[in-house]
Image (cartoon, rainbow, N blue to C red):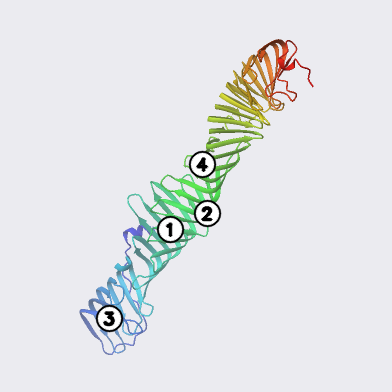
Amino acid sequence: MALACLATGCHAPPPKPKVKHERTPLTRAVAIRTKGSLPLQAANGDLICTISGEVRTEVAERDTAFELADATVASAPPQVPVTATAGRVRYAVGDTEVDFDHRLFVKSPTRHARLEAERARFSLETRRFSVAQRARAAYAGTLLEGDHVTADFDLRTLSADHLAALATRGAGETWTATSLRGKVDAQRQVHFETVKGTLRQGGRETHFEAPRALWKTSNETLDLDGGVTFRSAALTVHADGATWLRRERRIVTRGATTAEQAGMRAAGRGARIDLTSGTATVLAVRVEAKGGALNADSGRMEVDGRVTLHGLRGELPGGGTARAEEAVYNDRERRLVLTRGGEAQRGEATVAADRVVWDGGTKRITASGSVRLRQPGLVVRGDELTAPDDLRSARLTDVAAHGEAGAQHWDLNADRADWTRERTELTHPKGTFFARERTVDGTAGRAVYLPAKREVHLADGFEARGRADEVWVKADRAVYDVAGGVFRASGNVAARLRGVSVQDRQWTYYVGGDPHGVVGRGGGTRSPAEKEPRP
């Protein structure tokens, strides 16, 4: 109602004549009606203004009263230029107050301000207007309306009860506010106490309330303090304080900040709210959702129930921990997507990839792009990974696996890897085994790495070659002891070492040589290294 009156104007009936004091019955009276002007002076004798209009003067034995119809007011130099109009002005000689009614309109061009009221009283002592009823004002394009308004003659300052504000800028961009009390200071800043209102930008409405607010007309910002709340269609934000930057179409909060949306709560230190998109970015955030909590440097809550996290660290909703430079969590779908350095960890197992997805609905983790699965002594790389969210097992495709024990290690490429915490099975492995700066290249139909024993078990057509000892071996199966750098082949074994061929059921080859200088050992034809007795 207040804002409707502010936009269209209020019309009140003319007041009844006000009796200032009892007058002695006239023994002689003269009435004068003419065009003229009335100078108004302050108590110290300074000329305040001159009022011009149709003068109706009553001269009595004890006092003289002036009434000017269709009055115009002009301030006297060197004051700030002020003009005013009123349907009627009444003043009694010797009084310190002047009454204006029938639509007072005051304008101060220098201050970009104006005041409108149906009636008002002006004090010559304080040089202020006072309006007992509702009045309207404007400062630098901001429309104001309030009760019990008082204002300086040049509209330098203004105060009111139940102050309401309205400002527009372009099509569909407005903000409104109502408060218990308010004032305008000399810098044309509007102060509100116990305020609430609405911001309309980008086709969206955001409601706010706060104990205190300050509207700065110079840069079009609204500062809110003492604990502020913002509410939109899908988002509620609480903060210690905030500033609405109208030209940038965003809100910046200060201090402890929480954002709530669809059962999800993000708490942090400060936030940025984009009024066009309806999103809120909370800094140093902790997101509490149905499945758990996520910590991040910042989190942007979207209108569709998603939150985009930067600098993510903390717990996975299904258990374990997660890290990523950027992540997107959707609480409605219970889905977390880690990108840019995404990493998920459960126990000693870690999955890192260009994209890691935790799906709370299926309770599975998928990863793609430069996938790395790590556990102590083992790294498995691949194009894609699928696993239950407890990371007790996983399957990777197009694999490159690396295992190590001390200075010894191995690298195998494979079509697929089936991993558990106890074993990793590689399909069609092919690669290199390293020991004491010597290497052997090997292939097999299948390989199984046992991390507890630091052993690689190769089967289904094992074959290996090495340049150092001109070694070649082919067997049904073999076990590579990573820590010792030793192959132990079994089954139908055929080998050649330094030009000597071996046919045996078991055969051992020391890739880096054993401490006694032995490089090969078997039960059939011996290699040249074993023709001499061992010391």
**Left or right, 238 with reference to 123:** right
Q: Position of residue 288 (x, y in %)?
A: 58, 43
Kindly state the secondary structure of the residue where label 3 is placed: strand
Judged by depth in the image, the label closer to the viewer, 4 or 3, is 4
Q: Nearer the viewer, residue 404 or 203?
A: 404
Q: Amino acid at mark 3?
A: Pro
First of labels 1, 2 by sequence position: 1
Secondary structure of residue under mark 2: strand
Label 1 belongs to which residue?
Answer: 222
Residue 462 numbered tag: none
Q: Residues within 10 Å of mark 1 (few under 14, many from 20)?
A: some
For disc 2, the neighbor class at 10 Å (few under 14, some 14 to 19, many from 20) is many
Q: Which element type, helix, strand or loop, lies under badge 1?
A: strand
Marks 3 and 2 close (CB-CB < 8 Å): no
**124 up-or-down from 166: above or below:** below
Q: Of 178 and 243, which appears nearest the observer? A: 243
Q: Going from the N terminus, do you reach mark 2 or mark 4 first?
A: 2
Q: Earlier in the sequence, mark 3 or mark 1?
A: 3
Asked if disc 3 and disc 1 are in contact, CB closer than 8 Å, the reply is no
Whether residue 504 is situated above or below residue 233 in the rendered picture: above
Does residue 278 appear left or right of residue 115 in this picture? right
Label number found at residue 307: 4
First of labels 4, 3 by sequence position: 3
Which label sits on residue 39? 3
Number of numbered discs on residues: 4
Position of residue 363 measured from the top left corner of the image (x, y, whole percent): 60, 30
Can residue 134 be seen?
Answer: yes
Specify the quadrant of the image occupied by residue 154. bottom left
- Which residue is disc 2 drawn over? 239
On the image, which quarter does residue 23 sit in? bottom left
Q: Secondary structure at mark 4?
A: strand
Q: Amino acid at mark 4?
A: Val
